[in-house]
Amino acid sequence: MLSSKVSGTIKIALAQVNFLVGNISCNVDNIIKTANAARDDLCAELVVFPELIVTGYPAEDLLLRADFIEEANNAVHRIAECVDGIALVIGFPEWSEGKLYNSAVVIHNGVTLACYRKQSLPNYGVFDERRYFTPGKQPCVFEFNGTFIGLTICEDVWQEGIIAANKEAGADILLTLNASPFNLGKMHQREAVICSQVKAAQLPLVYVNQVGGQDELIFDGASFVVSGQGEIVYRAEEFQDYLGLVEFTDNLPIPSTCVPLDEKIAGAYHALVLGIKDYVRKNSFSGALLGLSGGIDSALVLALAVDALGSEKVEAVLMPSRYTSDMSNEDAVLEAEALQVQYHVVPIEPAVNAFNAMLADVFAGTKKDTTEENIQARCRGVILMAMSNKQGKLLLTTGNKSEMSVGYATLYGDMAGGFAPIKDVPKMLVYELARYRNSISPVIPERVLIRPPSAELAPDQVDQDSLPPYDVLDPILERYVERDQSAEEIMAAGFSYEHVARAISLVDRNEYKRRQSPPGIRITTRAFGRDRRYPITSGYKGIK
């Protein structure tokens, strides 16, 4: 055990930054720029970056490429050569003796002071770290200007014993580098767990989290500092790049800026905005477009897109059919005008008639059914994809999690597109998010919020003709999809056999559709795709 001593004052910068997975050269430039700003503007002595910041997180199977890992390891040497006057703690994939580690290195004036290897590798939910990394075996404590500092990485501080092991190894302060993704309630859970661990060990902790959107994942930032008594004494902004400073005197953090955490609905809204913004920006689209129906889902997606990109980069397309009500057309126009976006009206009737005529002989002797309804949705998909191709704008789909769960969507129709912002947002939460957005400024007409939802693909059609009411359906889906409860458990909670059987049957038989849907932003504890991976071909039935 190291011999700790009173160290006076140390100034530590928290670099909560939004980097691009895979672009190592650009990431290194940003690390150098940020470190110099921490030194020059904040007078920091040490700056802490998030987990695996050199490559971005998660780099997924890029980590299996030898050339990628070599570039990442060489990048650490470049950083060491380019920054002086401040110590840096950066995350990178360390290649050593034929093994890959999720590591944190401390560099000061060109010299490596320490290198820590993450011990607890998560392999659940959205995490696959055991696919790539070998776990480290021991704590790492280094001396810097008379202070003994311990290093940990993300999952380490969620596990019993690792914080305490750093205390036993002589650490006065603990630094943890993180890429902890957002879901509803995650910020409060994160702080509660870590504050409890810190309080037990009586070891102050600096928690630096990544920020930004990466495919389905959102990293919310909200970096913080915990005193040895388990109290939050500093918190950074959520969903924003942030370079801040915390000062320790005699190993005690001086309370400073403590930004309040968002409420649940506000946090979800800001996460969705960031997800759209980063997906468009990082994939070099010129903007976004979407089909605007006059319904609640497309109204919310339009508002999110405008808040993410600005009205000048968003287009809306109204595609009325013979079944589209005047109310829907009017509301769609009102939404587009309120958000000041350019909109187009492209009626689909000529295309629908053409397809029906082309298929008349093939369909002779059959009754009209959902096939004809789906032709309408697919005509809209062709129009929207054509505009996306022509303009280089990302096509946003507008389906919500409730619809994706039960397959209430048309393959190659309303599911056609490049990104699905509300794919993990249950229908009832869609309404809450819409009302939250209207509390900022009224952009969604009130009657959109109160009238029964409808696909408007048939006369007088409403969603409830085919589905249980959403206030019943959503909690059933939450229990079955996110919590893996059985039909018996769900019915024991008070739901009828009829509703449970209908919902579960639809979920089970629509996996093939979900596999073909575009990626979407994850905001719940279990989203389709990364989290919930079910076979398409399966004899399992959730309801007997």
Image (tube, rainbow, N blue to C red):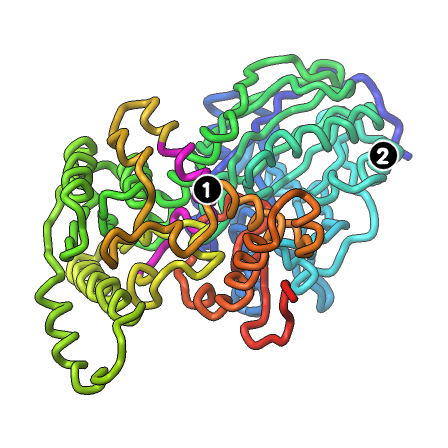
> Which quarter shows the N terminus?
top right
Q: Which residue is mark 1?
A: 212
Question: Can the viewer see residue 517?
Answer: yes
The label on residue 105 is none
User: Closer to the N terminus: mark 1 or mark 2?
Assistant: 2
| Image-based side of 373 in relation to 517, left or right | left
Q: Which residue is mark 2?
A: 164
- Give the image location of residue 400, x and y in percent: 41, 49
User: In which quadrant of the rendered view does residue 30 lie?
Assistant: top left
Amino acid bearing label 1? Gly
Chain part drawn in magenta? 417-434
Q: Nearest to the eye among marks 1 and 2: give it.
A: 1
- Tell me the SS state at disc 1: strand
Report the residue at 38% width, 48% height from top.
421
Asked if residue 39 shows in the view, the reply is no
Q: Vertical placement of 442 versus 151: above or below? A: above
- Where residue 317 appears, x then y in whole percent? 17, 50
Please report the residue visible at 64 percent of the width from the left and 40 percent of the height from the top.
177
- Residue nearer the viewer, 10 or 61: 61
Q: Residue at x 56, y 50 (%)?
A: 477
| Residue 35 lies in the magenta-colored region | no
Number of other residues with Cα within 10 Å of mark 1, as a class: few under 14, some 14 to 19, many 20 or more:
many
Residue 398 lies, in percent from the top left, at: 33, 50
Q: Nearer the viewer, residue 419 or 352?
A: 352
Q: Amino acid at mark 2?
A: Ala
Which quarter of the figure is the C terminus placed in? bottom right
Q: Secondary structure at mark 2?
A: helix
Q: Residues within 10 Å of mark 2 (few under 14, many from 20)?
A: some
Examine the image and state in which quarter residue 142 appears.
top right
